[in-house]
Amino acid sequence: MASEAELRLRERLGRLRRTGLLGGARLSGELERLQRQLDRLTTEPSDEEIWRSVELARHQDRPYTLDYVQRLCEDFVELRGDRARADDAALVTGLARFGGRTIALIGQQKGRDIRERTRRNFGMAHPEGYRKGMRVMEIAERHCFPLVTFVDTPGAYPGVAAEQHGQGGAIARSQALMARLTVPVVTSVIGEGSSGGASAIALADRILMQEHAIFVVISPEGCAAILWRDAAEARKAAAAFKPDAAHCLELGVVDAIVPEPEGGAHTNHDEAARLLGESLSEALEDLETIPGDELRRLRRARFRALGVFAPTPAPA
Amino acid sequence: MSSRIDVSIEHRHSPEQPERTHPNTCPKCDSHYRDDELDASLWVCPQCGHHFPVRARRRIAQLADEGSFSEDAADLRSEDPLGFFDLRPYTERLAEAETSTGLGEAIVIGEAAIEERPCELAVMDFAFMGGSMGSVVGEKFSRACDSAAERGLPLVSVTASGGARMQEGILSLMQLPKAVCAVEDLRDAGCALISVMSHPTTAGVMASFASLGDVLVAEPGALLAFTGPRVVQQTTREKLPDQVGLAESNHPVGHIDAIVPRPQRRAYVGRLLRLFANGK
């Protein structure tokens, strides 16, 4: 696996180098970015480094969705409510200007202090949140706005009301709607990308992942509780299921790793936002050249290629 | 005798002993049956209507016309992309599941006919690692969608799953969007998806293709939930209403179209297939 991802990156690097002057300055940025990713890939993170990412991804001072929106966008207008029964503050949506274009935004939002944390339900959305998100996806599709999503959640909320209001169905339909969009979709994993609550808004053309974010099928504690029968074994679980950005890139789950300021995104919100903004606008510019139908076809093909099994299918 | 001595302090945290009941004893009414009696009743308790869990092959036999099923992609096997090792290596768990179930993975797909209407079938098996969805389940379900789309036929899925397979890490989470994309390709081809949800249909499978059927049909008593009641209780400490998450509580609030007992299932699905075929 390692060598395959490495080869893919090396091949892209080689191709970019050969195109020489055509791409100009932007291309050289891309070159550096790929080179950095390659360097990261060839040095496999240790178990300690993986656990450090888990801690940094959940750091209480880490920038959240609205911190990035505030720094990267102009004219942000928040849109509220699912038009059926509630406004879920755990998931924020809206429209804003980014790099001269209007974009539709969806992202989970955690709180800074205990009051806001409670109000935001620690970034754990109910079905109402995902339905609000779908409403904004429809606006994006109707008006040809690119969709930008920020993933930062410990998971979809596991409560009685959430179940009664159809949590599973809401997550499924949110993904299904994203698979139908003909506008560019870029997802950034900016903290915890945990389970179905994360994948509900991550069916994107490009998934960017911050250096110290994690992308997991279940929290390390949850995994440890089930497989080790002891939540305290979370470190072992994290080391075993490798939720860090380098491994996600290696497995082809994410398309690029976004560097963070030295010490982690929480040390310098402005610099973290600048780095994320760079990758985001590169990704959007790439995608905006592709026709809508093709974009959708490629998006589905991207996800349908994910998985490791034997025998390997013959190339089509 | 010794059970009367209070050992609650030592035993407070010890795991509960699983009840040793015979698989042919009804957990609801304690009636006991021979295999042939339960076969004849499609593994539904003749006394109280409890639906016993049914393995994939038997389910196909119950649902599809006799001899109509032809299996596809039976050779697909999971790999171990992460070198996953919890208390035991993932590869060992896989090998054990294959030996004990006689299946290569937690889902069986293939062509079939139900009440003489041709269709594609995708049937999950809870006995294979809790019906968990890893790369192979995602791939086989997607191939079932493609096979149905190519032939212009409806896909009937029967789910039984505890969710994504943790041992494949993030790749197992990616099977949710993968399966969703396959369903969207199936829809673009104009084909129907009938989703039969059996016990249990939870987490990753509930949050992807199982919920996306044009018609959602549940088995009586099936747990249909994103998060199961035990985990809800542990995380939120909420007081749980009766029947929370069961098909019977999902039906009145509009999450599923119907609860259909097993003996009527073939006729019910057959009628849906005729309707979706619209006289063709």
Image (cartoon, helix red, strand yellow):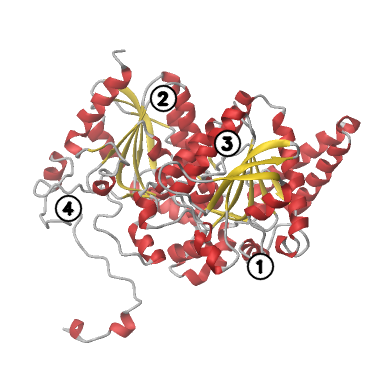
Q: Residues within 10 Å of mark 1 (few under 14, many from 20)?
A: few
Q: Which mark is residue B148?
A: 2
Residue A250, x across and y down, in percent: 66, 48
Q: Are marks 2 and 4 on the same chain?
A: yes
Q: Earlier in the sequence, mark 1 or mark 3?
A: 1
Q: Residues within 10 Å of mark 2 (few under 14, many from 20)?
A: many
CA–CA distance between discs 2 and 4?
Answer: 36 Å
Q: Decide if residue A260 is in sight here.
A: no
Q: Are marks 3 and 4 on the same chain?
A: no
Q: Which mark is residue A48?
A: 1
Q: Secondary structure at mark 3?
A: loop
Q: Secondary structure at mark 1?
A: helix
Residue B265, x across and y down, in percent: 22, 34
Residue named by callout 3? A305
CA–CA distance between discs 2 and 1?
Answer: 47 Å
Amino acid at the residue labelled 2: Ala
Residue visible at 37% across and 21% down in the picture: B153
Q: In front of the other: label 1 or label 4?
A: 1
CA–CA distance between discs 1 and 3?
Answer: 31 Å
Q: Chain of mark 1?
A: A
CA–CA distance between discs 1 and 4?
Answer: 49 Å
Amino acid at the residue labelled 1: Glu
Q: Which mark is residue A85?
A: none
Residue visible at 32% across and 21% down in the picture: B276
Q: Secondary structure at mark 2?
A: helix
Q: Which mark is residue B24?
A: 4
Q: Are marks 1 and 4 on the same chain?
A: no
Q: Chain of mark 4?
A: B
Q: In front of the other: label 3 or label 4?
A: 3
Residue visible at 48% across and 53% down in the picture: A125
Amino acid at the residue labelled 4: Asn
